[in-house]
Image (cartoon, grey):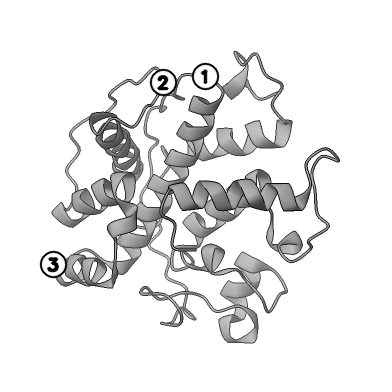
């Protein structure tokens, strides 16, 4: 078991502990459009927003360091953290028209949603939140996929298949089908990859997405998995 959950009284799959450990490490490493200090601050602000709104985070520690971020970033962090069901295209357009880059928008969404995923898992097992490490040195890569285009999302995405070219192959592999939830953050491939890795381990990966006989445990069928997923999505006012 990864050190991240060494204090758990429950047996946790090694692949799940590993992907959560890698997720926590990624929050404190340079990203594509934000440096490590800014990424760490985005996660810390998200946690603060949720704690202040009454969303339970066990063993909550305020790790905000008052790092300067664009005003649009602060609005987005708060909305994704606490009122994501209210986000619409007009909200997105307002932020980008006031200076927040679409690429920054995507990176923030990825960071906050991944942090919520790990925090919710900890809470479900009665574990305290995983503390953030110190920010690492380095600068954002600012790499922009050259095949990204407006398709089925508000932000540009990398299309699957031949339209997506080399960036699609690097991110999705050799496939002509990618679920919208995985492609939505592809303008920033590092965040898309992080979400896909969590989805692969916590839920169902791309290769098994349409395999309705897929299961991880013989005592928990794909149908039961989808029932739980659908119920949680409904409680969270998920669009899907």
Query: Disc 2 vs disc 3: Cβ atoms closer than 8 Å?
Result: no
Task: Say few, some or many: other residues with alpha carbon within 10 Å of mark 3 (under 14 / 14 to 19 / 20 or more).
Answer: few
Query: Disc 2 vs disc 1: Cβ atoms closer than 8 Å?
Result: yes
Residue drawn 55% across the image and 79% down it:
159
Residue 115 pos. (x, y %): 43, 40
Task: Say few, some or many: other residues with alpha carbon within 10 Å of mark 2 (under 14 / 14 to 19 / 20 or more).
Answer: some
Viewer-closest of 125 and 225? 225
Give the Cα separation between the discs numbered 2 and 1: 7 Å
- The first of marks 3 and 1 along the sequence is 3
In the displayed structure, does residue 205 sit left or right of residue 61? right
Q: Which residue is mark 1?
A: 126
Query: Disc 3 vs disc 1: Cβ atoms closer than 8 Å?
Result: no
Q: Residue furthest right?
A: 218
Residue drawn 51% across the image and 75% down it:
158
Viewer-closest of 140 and 92? 92
Q: Which residue is mark 3?
A: 98
Query: In which image quadrant can residue 237 be found?
Result: bottom left
Q: Which residue is mark 2?
A: 58
Dot in front, 3 or 1: 1
- The first of marks 2 and 1 along the sequence is 2
Judged from the image, the secondary structure of the residue bearing numbered disc 2 is loop
Judged from the image, the secondary structure of the residue bearing numbered disc 1 is loop
- The first of marks 2 and 3 along the sequence is 2
Query: In which image quadrant can residue 3 be found?
Result: top right
Residue drawn 48% across the image and 34% down it:
120
Residue drawn 53% across the image and 32% down it:
121
Residue 160 pos. (x, y %): 61, 78
Give the Cα separation between the discs numbered 3 and 1: 41 Å
Judged from the image, the secondary structure of the residue bearing numbered disc 3 is loop
């Amino acid at each position: 078991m990864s050190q991240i959950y060494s204090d758990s009284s429950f047996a946790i799959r090694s692949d799940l502990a590993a992907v959560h450990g890698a997720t926590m490490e990624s929050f404190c490493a340079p990203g594509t459009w934000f440096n490590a200090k800014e990424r760490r601050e985005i996660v810390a602000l998200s946690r603060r927003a949720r704690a202040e709104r009454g969303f339970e985070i066990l063993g909550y520690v305020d790790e905000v360091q008052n790092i300067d971020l664009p005003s649009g970033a602060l609005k987005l962090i708060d909305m994704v953290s606490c009122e994501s069901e209210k986000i619409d295209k007009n909200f997105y357009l307002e932020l980008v028209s006031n200076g927040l880059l679409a690429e920054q928008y995507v990176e923030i969404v990825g960071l906050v949603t991944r942090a919520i995923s790990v925090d919710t898992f900890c809470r479900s097992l009665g574990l305290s939140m995983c503390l953030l490490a110190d920010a690492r040195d380095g600068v954002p890569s600012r790499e922009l996929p050259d095949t990204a285009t407006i398709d089925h999302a508000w932000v540009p995405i990398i299309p699957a298949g031949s339209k997506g070219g080399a960036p699609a192959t690097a991110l999705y592999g050799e496939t002509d089908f990618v679920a919208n939830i995985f492609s939505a953050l592809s303008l920033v491939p590092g965040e898309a990859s992080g979400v896909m890795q969590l989805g692969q381990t916590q839920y169902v990966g791309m290769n098994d997405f349409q395999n309705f006989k897929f299961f991880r445990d013989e005592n928990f069928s794909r149908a039961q998995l989808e029932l739980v997923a659908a119920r949680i999505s409904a409680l969270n006012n998920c669009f899907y």
